[in-house]
Amino acid sequence: MTTVFDELLSGFKSFLGRFDQQPLRGFIDGVDWSMRPRRLEPSGLPCLSHLSRAARIAGAEAAPLARFLDDRCHDFRWGQTYTSVDFGKRFIDNYGWLEVFGTRGHFENRKMAGGFLILGPNIAYPDHHHVAEEIYIPLTGGTEWRMGEGGYRRREAGEIIHHTSDMNHAMRTGAEPMLALYLWRGGPLAARSTVTGTVGRELT
């Protein structure tokens, strides 16, 4: 019997199958998608209040996946790496992730982690870095991203954003929330990022 978790993994895989570009192909070619499910209790977060809006503004190809997440969000375990002590309550109330597969996700994978990140409107995720190599694909457009010593650059839905190991990067939203797919590999898959910038805050 197909479960909501099987549908989640299948939708994740199908969305990635739309892309032929490197370095994404190098991430997902050879992935064994027959992952063992892990029993996790559902856990919600305040940031889920932004999912309905994110589903409405998602790119055309991402919209079915975004709507599925919105419809079934309370079936999954959402998590946070930080606390209000790190970045303040407003950031925490507008931030969260869902690990589909990895060392703590709904499916077991020791080599790679994949999932979704939510940021509410007018939130800055400060400069940070981690050992794991990372790919983001925003499902919604309009968020600004920065990497290395460069400035912020507006990114649209469906763009592939690649952060090499220990590359400093940051992102910030404007008037709309962000929903993005992510992949991690090549480092501790549950490691806490090293924050190097100003803590998350409301943009002015």
Image: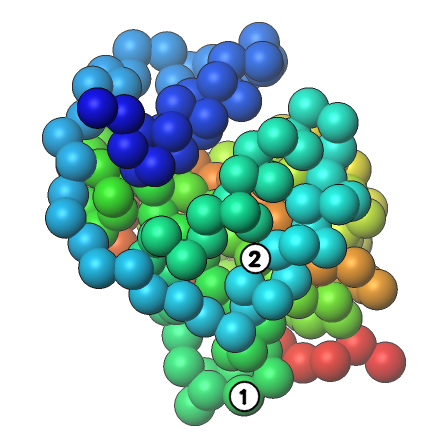
Quarter of the picture containing the C terminus is bottom right
User: Closer to us: mark 2 or mark 1?
Assistant: 2
At label 1, the amino acid type is Gly
Sort mark 1 into few (<14), some (14-19) or many (20+) by Cα contacts within 10 Å: some
Look at the picture and state if 91 lies above or below 183: below
Q: Residue at x 31, y 37 (%)?
A: 5
At label 2, the amino acid type is Ile
> Picture coordinates of residue 122 (x, y %)?
76, 71
Relative to 100, is 63 on the left or the right? right
Relative to 1, is 21 on the left or the right? right
Sort mark 2 into few (<14), some (14-19) or many (20+) by Cα contacts within 10 Å: many
Q: Secondary structure at mark 2?
A: strand
Q: Residue at x 29, y 60 (%)?
A: 42
Q: Quadrant of residue 151?
A: bottom right
Look at the picture and state if 62 lies above or below 148: above
Q: Secondary structure at mark 1?
A: loop
Q: Which of disc 1 and disc 2 is earlier in sequence?
A: 1
Q: Which residue is mark 1?
A: 88
Q: Quadrant of residue 133?
A: top left
Mark drawn on residue 156 = none
Quarter of the picture containing the N terminus is top left
Q: Which residue is mark 2?
A: 118
Spatial CA span between label 2 and label 1: 16 Å
